[in-house]
Image (tube, coloured by chain):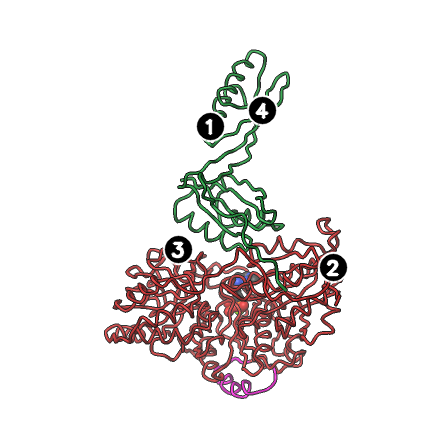
Amino acid sequence: MKHTLSVLVENNPGVLARVAGLFSRRGFNIDSLAVGMTDNSSVSRMTIVVEGDERYLEQLNKQLHKLVDVIKISDITRDAYVDRELVLIKVSADAAKRAEIMQLVDIFRARIVDVSPKTLTIEVTGNDGKVTAFEDSLRPFGIKELVRTGKIAMLRGKRASSKNHINKEEDES
Amino acid sequence: MEITVAEALVRCLEQENVEIIFGYPGGAILPVYDALNKSVIKHVLVRHEQGAAHMADGYARVTGKVGVCLATSGPGATNLVTGIANAYMDSVPMVVITGQVATSMVGTDAFQEVDITGITLPITKHNYLVKKPEQLPAVVKKAFLLASTGRPGPVLIDLPKDVAQTKINFKYPKKVALPGYKPTIKGHSAMVQQAAKIMMRSQRPVIYAGGGVRIANAAPELLQLAETICAPVTHTLMGLGSFPGDHPLFLGMLGLHGTRYANQAVTECDCLIAVGARFDDRVVSKISGFAPSAKIIHIDIDPAEIGKNVITQLPIVGDVKNVLGALLTHMEKKENTSWMERIRRLKEEMPLHYKQDGNLKPQYVIEKLNEYKEDSAIVVTDVGQHQMWAALYMRFNEPRSFLSSGGLGAMGFCLPAAIGAQLGAPHRQVILVVGDGGIQMTMQELGTAAEQKLPLKIFILNNNRLGMVRQLQEFYCDSRYFAVDFKLNPDFAELARIYGMEGYTVETPEHLLEILPRVLSSAAPVVVNCIIDREEDVLPMVLDGSNIDEAIE
Ligand SMILES: Cc1ncc(C[n+]2csc(CCOP(=O)(O)OP(=O)(O)O)c2C)c(N)n1
Ligand SMILES: [Mg+2]
């Protein structure tokens, strides 16, 4: 089963290497990882998608917790959450195919962000299901290049999976 | 007052009550050495940085304090790596300080630059590259806090030279913020009560004690628990010493080269109480055959150890001393004559044994050392057959009296670790049990030992070969021996004399007995080169793929 972890980390140099290194050396596979600063500049949020059973996830969770820079981990898989991913797709599009592709772009509420005589570059945002469906429908035209940001997620409603404003007491003298 | 970061570092170390630093200088660490020169902290100049790390490690294991070592950038730092990994695997509190090239040069492959924080990422509890001068005091405070609390481990501080030379307004922080670090000390009370119930009800309990008992200073609680519920105690290599070796409930080491009665008791038990141990593969062998009829209760400060290798019925995360203390409040002394009788019989039926045939047997050397050593002696081993014989045939009645490289199994550990141990416990007898292979991995530290005038008692169990690997080849390669015999070993006794130590060579049991009392009571450092039977195997032995109760002997 796929799990979505929302992980708050101290925004220290090397924190990404610590997390990525832990995954590789303990044999955990990352499906996707997106990282960026929160509204608190000393804290970043990583949204990590991993696949595995309960025991695997439990081990991963505990090992992640051992990293001193990791502040909080929430497995939001079973909660109601909104998730988004942004994907850029460069697809072959000669004059004959162009109209058909543009129709798909409309249906999926995607956007064309660049045009060349032989290709279209399309931006689409959405959850995993939508993005994958869009990709599948473009595949017959010939996808030349594709990049995904990885998923970011947030709980629905007023709940927060983790506060950005941790009480980071300043080092007192 | 403004002082340089290097001076501030030394002040921080003084504030942390550091008495001794093991190190080796060089260009990038020059400012720190210049500052250290003015300090009351003793500096021990080693012969190789690996030695410095193992010394800090041995010092920490014996004293329970944080061991500190120091090296320059590049090769100095990389030479530390084995010692850092060793401390990490055995959860030893250590602070490692390395010099680094100037910040403007970092990342340019400058002379003697290596990315030591990158290299040590997986073998430190945490590490820091100090980029801003004013960060240093808090970084040192955090390093000591992290190294010594929770599950201890090594923390590395990499200090660029220009940062070390910058002046700051020094103040040592009283408190530091580590929002992601909250070790659990107190066990969950419902779990504790439930565990107490299971233990009280069990008919055949066994305690499986690891290094966590020593780290938590929980030997008294362990003894009390064992006696309260009539549970015999078996140890991991790291756990030896935390329970009196002459106690009727003592089972000795379990696992791959464990005693047969310890492995049998674990196989028969209905409740296995793992205390500060981590179900290492050298203990468990085949998982399905390990304690097959037992409810497993696992007490450990590191939640990640719970359920990692075997599935436990009842985990309690917390400090071992704290949890055992809490457990004891829910218990009353119970009797269990049939289980005690069963244990007594197992010990009688499957004793440790070896053949005496007139040659000098390694087991005999250990038995005699055990007989003649002081009660409070510290025994330090290297890695190999001699290590296993020491673990099996030595008896300890005090914690922190047996030091060995467990998790990493790093040859070369013995001599430097013993130097650190002796400096940490100047009044205790320190006995080294080391192989002819392992001594030659860090033999240069004889210079450090002699220079520091340490009365180490170094016993080389000399089979002129890599005995443990020969044994593996015997069992797993149909005795096709290869690359295990030394055709040239130095005369170790002569070598000792060259370093100003006493040196003896012993080839017979009689000769050993003759010199042992004198050697062990001498105030001088001594090397005893024991020429032992070359063909001896460490037995019992659980072969790959077997259950622990299926050892050959
Ligand atoms: C640094 C290192 N290299 C290799 C090994 C693999 N190894 C384990 S035991 C052993 C032989 C040790 O020989 P010696 O020190 O003479 O001890 P003996 O087994 O003969 O008692 C070797 C090579 C190791 N544990 N550590
Ligand atoms: Mg040998």
Q: Considering the numbered disc 3 on the image, is that residue within a helix, a strand or a loop?
A: loop
> Quadrant location of residue B129?
bottom right
Q: Amino acid at mark 3?
A: Gly
Residue B337 spot, x, y in % from top left:
24, 76
B527 or B80: nearer the viewer: B80
Write down the chain letter for disc 2: B
| Residue ID for mark 3 | B307
Q: Amino acid at mark 2?
A: Lys
| Residue ID for mark 2 | B161
B176 or A89: nearer the viewer: B176
| Residue ID for mark 4 | A90
Write down the chain letter for disc 3: B
Q: Colour of chain A?
A: green
* Numbered range of the magenta stretch: B506-525
Q: Is mark 4 within 8 Å of ligand 1?
A: no
Q: Is residue B159 visible?
A: yes
Q: Earlier in the sequence, mark 4 or mark 1?
A: 4
Callout 2–callout 4 Cβ contact below 8 Å: no
Callout 2–callout 1 Cβ contact below 8 Å: no
Q: Considering the numbered disc 2 on the image, is that residue within a helix, a strand or a loop?
A: helix
Q: Amino acid at mark 1?
A: Lys
Residue A87 on the magenta segment: no
Residue B243 spot, x, y in % from top left:
41, 75
Q: Colour of chain B?
A: red
Q: Earlier in the sequence, mark 2 or mark 3?
A: 2
Tell me the distance, in whole angstroms, between the alpha carbons under discs 1 and 3.
37 Å
Q: Which mark is residue A43?
A: none
